[in-house]
C-alpha cells in the first residue's frame, strides 16, 4: 500500500513569532517517510494545511489514487 503524505513548507525551526503554525515535519522526518516508501508532497502551508491552502489539498486529493487496504 502506498501512503501519500502532504506536508507544509513553513519550517518548524528556528523558534520565532509568526502567524501561521509551522509544519511539524522537518527534513529528518521527510527523509524517514521517503525511506519507508511514503510519497511526499510539500505545499505552501503551515501545520493547518487544509486551512492555509485548501486549493492544494483539493488538487492533491482529486489526483491521488485511492486504494483499499
Image: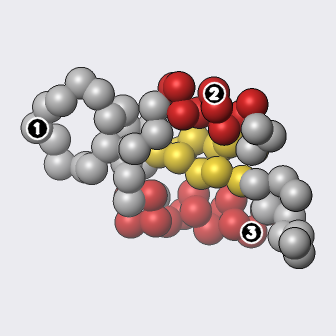
Q: Secondary structure at mark 2?
A: helix
Whole-angstrom CA distance, mark 1 to mark 3, is: 34 Å
Give residue 32's position: percent from left, percent from top. 64, 31
Q: Give whichever of 52, 35 is nearer the camera.
A: 35
Mark 3 sits on what residue? 62
Q: Earlier in the sequence, mark 3 or mark 2?
A: 2
Give the left or right position of residue 68, taking residue 63 as reference. right
Quadrant of the image occupied by residue 39: top right
Mark 2 sits on what residue? 31
Contact between marks 3 and 2 (CB within 8 A): the answer is no
- 36 in relation to 27, above or below: below
Whole-angstrom CA distance, mark 2 to mark 1, is: 27 Å
Quadrant of the image occupied by residue 58: bottom right
Q: Earlier in the sequence, mark 1 or mark 3?
A: 1
Mark 1 sits on what residue? 17
> Which residue is painted at 88% across and 58% down in the image?
1
Give residue 63's position: percent from left, percent from top. 79, 62
Give the left or right position of residue 15, taking residue 3 as reference. left
Amino acid at each position: 500500500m502506498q501512503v501519500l503524505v502532504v506536508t507544509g513548507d513553513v519550517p518548524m525551526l528556528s523558534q520565532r513569532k509568526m502567524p501561521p503554525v509551522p509544519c511539524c515535519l522537518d527534513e529528518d522526518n521527510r527523509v524517514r517517510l521517503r525511506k519507508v516508501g511514503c510519497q511526499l508532497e510539500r505545499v505552501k502551508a503551515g501545520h493547518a494545511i487544509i486551512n492555509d491552502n485548501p486549493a492544494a489539498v483539493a488538487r492533491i486529493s482529486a489526483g491521488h489514487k485511492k486504494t483499499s487496504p
